[in-house]
Image: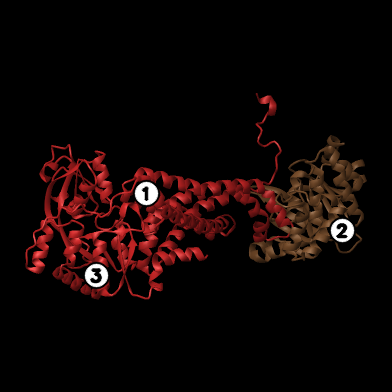
Chain colours: A red, B brown
Amino acid sequence: MKNPYFIVLLLFGSVLLADEPVLRWAADAESGAPNVFYENGDLSKLVGFEKDIIDHIAKRLGRKAEFHQNDWDGLISGLQRDLYDVVINGFSPEEGKENSAIFSNPYYACGLSLIVRSNTDTIKSILDCSGAIVGVLRSSKAENILINSLKDVKVIGYPNEYCAISDLKDKRVDAILLDGQNAAYYTRKLSGLKIVDELDEIKYSIVSTPKNSELMAAINDIIGDMQRDGSLDAIVSKWGLHNTSYSHLCEKSRGSKTETTSLNPGSPGGQDKPTVQYVKVLPFFIKAAYVTLMISILSMCVAIVLGLCFAIMRVYMPKWISFFAISVIELLRGIPLLIQLFFVFYGLPCIGITLPPLVAGILTLGMNYAAYEAENFRAGMAAVPYGQMEAARALGMNQWQSLRHVILPQAFTFVLPPLTNDFIAILKDSSLVSLITIMELTKTYMLIASNSFNFFGMGAIVALIYFLIGLPFAQLAKLAEKHLKLEKRAYSSRKIGGRYNR
Amino acid sequence: MSNRPEPLISISNLCKDYGQDRILKHVSFQIESGDLVSVIGPSGCGKSTLLRCLNCLEVLDDGEITIDGVCLCTMDHEKNEDFFWRQAHQLRQNVGMVFQSFNLFPHKTLLDNVTLAQIVVKHERQEKAKALAMALLEKVGLGNLSGRYPWSLSGGEKQRAAIARALAMKPKVMLYDEPTSSLDPEMVEEVLQVMRDLDAEGMTQIIVTHEMRFAKDASDYIIYMENGEIIEISDEDEIFINPQDDRTRRFLKRYM
């Protein structure tokens, strides 16, 4: 029991351990360059210009900055869940979330850049995009602009920049419209792409909830100070992110003009050789594999216990309890796991039940699989001959005693193979909990792969790890099956007909 | 038999329906302590159902069963189900049952088969339960097989183990539902011998059987059933030598 708690503490509870007050901030580091990202997929090296800014702000607040990874789509929900204090991840105040979130004064501004493949001649400006397929970030300002200003353009929303970029390279889209500094970073980093048009101005703000308005006021002051004393400029210069929009922003706040166009090559530090990369990422994968394994095992325990209860309720209890069990089973089976997960994690807090991510994940997975296990157990109990129950009852055992000592031990031997099956399934389904901020194997893979631009090699590693985790359980189940077998048939492996079968 | 005062088992007006069909029609009889009674009759005549009713494996639809002072009647089942099942539990304490298909617990050794109910139901201590189980297994001739699992035994051995398992609860009545019907002919005798031994010790036994010779030799008296009714109850000699009813005569002719 110590280890799960350890993880919880590690991920979310370090608040309790630190002496210094912390500033909990969140972003999606999955291909978030140059905003917030892991350098070359090294999960111990979180970098980015927004990280520099928030570190700076935290220092001036006298707090310790503490990073929380969350999916882009869940960043604002996480704020309301009070998983962290602020979000800094290229959010613009215009994106229409004013009622649930408050936005700081802008710390950066940029234009939108239209990127195409180097050999594309047909698209020279945003107006040429009519009839083309254009990729954007999901629910970004670029998406709004495209849909509202251009007719018959097909817009595809991506969860992160890297997906959009790779689809452009793979010719799935004709062009992509990204925030200026992202476009600059990726066109520099990857060959075969070019920026053909720049338009509009977007401002970046730190996001928080209304109840943190005092903190936000302090942050606004600090942003103002940073703009005046040049420390913000220093960060922007370091990352090579100067542009006209940003200069306009500075002008407004400072009243002086600094028109500098930087040619800084961007992210400091080059890329490692692939082999070195693999060795470096291995510890992160192993840690993540441990999280995945732990979530799967605990979820399976929940599933087995609950499933057994449901099965017994369904088969042996009075009608109304049995009806209740059937309803729950059908409900849990019939609703997608992902929806259950979001409901438990983001929905239940609305009625006052706030669960830590790990607990929510394990509970949801466990409940969902409990429905399947219940049916497995029901089948197992049905496979025990009825005479067994009669014999037990005739000996004077009551129903529960008969179940406990006679029916269930036998049913378990029938249930073991499908149970193993479901454990391997739960191992794979556990990847869904990455969507509620848990850093398990799949999430780690996505982060490392997208930050190191190596989906193939990292994918092979993560696939191998999943396979290796599942393997011993399949073997274990085989052993247990052999041990528990009710009837030992000496020739069970032979085909019926034996040697005359040829 | 009627001159003795308190019958151990008394059944009056017992009826059992399966849906529309009435399987048992107003069955009444009494059995004294220490009697060995054989129930015979053609297939589907309701003799197995009668036995299962005596042990509450089937709930009776009408009538009354009294075994050793514990009374079950349909009125109770309709009015107060809880009370009915408490009575049924009480009644089962005095009744042991042996099935045609043995129904030994396949996940337990013979010894554990015999100790399980003692420990679970009577909360007997492990050593005490084991001692009794060993004694009973010795008695049915399986003392050396106590560590074996049911799958490794012959049919006759399984049925003797099942008898030992039922005896472990110290019942006053033993019910046998066609105990030898699924056995090879050479194993039938070893099972019947156990029943003869028990009879000699004064155990009350009711046996549903197709073993006419055993019924004739060992029974104190015989119940002949057909179509859910008791046609004839009589001493074993009488029913075989001089059946009173035509239907009994026809049935015995086919068997003897």
Badge 1 local density, few (<14 within 10 Å), some, or many (20+)?
A: some
**Co-location on one chain, circles 1 and 2:** no
- Report the disc number at residue A57: 3
The x, y position of residue B186, in whole percent, is 86, 38
Residue A230 in view here? yes
The x, y position of residue A174, in whole percent, is 20, 40
Q: Tell me how far mark 1 sits from mark 3, CA to CA.
A: 32 Å
Mark 3: which amino acid? Answer: Ile
Badge 3 local density, few (<14 within 10 Å), some, or many (20+)?
A: many
Which residue in the structure is indicated by mark 1? A277
Task: Give the structural element (helix, strand or loop) at label 3.
Answer: helix
Task: Give the structural element (helix, strand or loop) at label 2.
Answer: loop
Mark 1–mark 2 CB contact (< 8 Å):
no
Q: Nearer the viewer, residue A209 or A38?
A: A38
Mark 2: which amino acid? Answer: Glu
Count of labels in the image: 3
In the rendered image, the quadrant that contains the C terminus of chain A is top right
Which residue in the structure is indicated by mark 2? B32
| Residue A90 in the figure: left or right of residue A44 | left
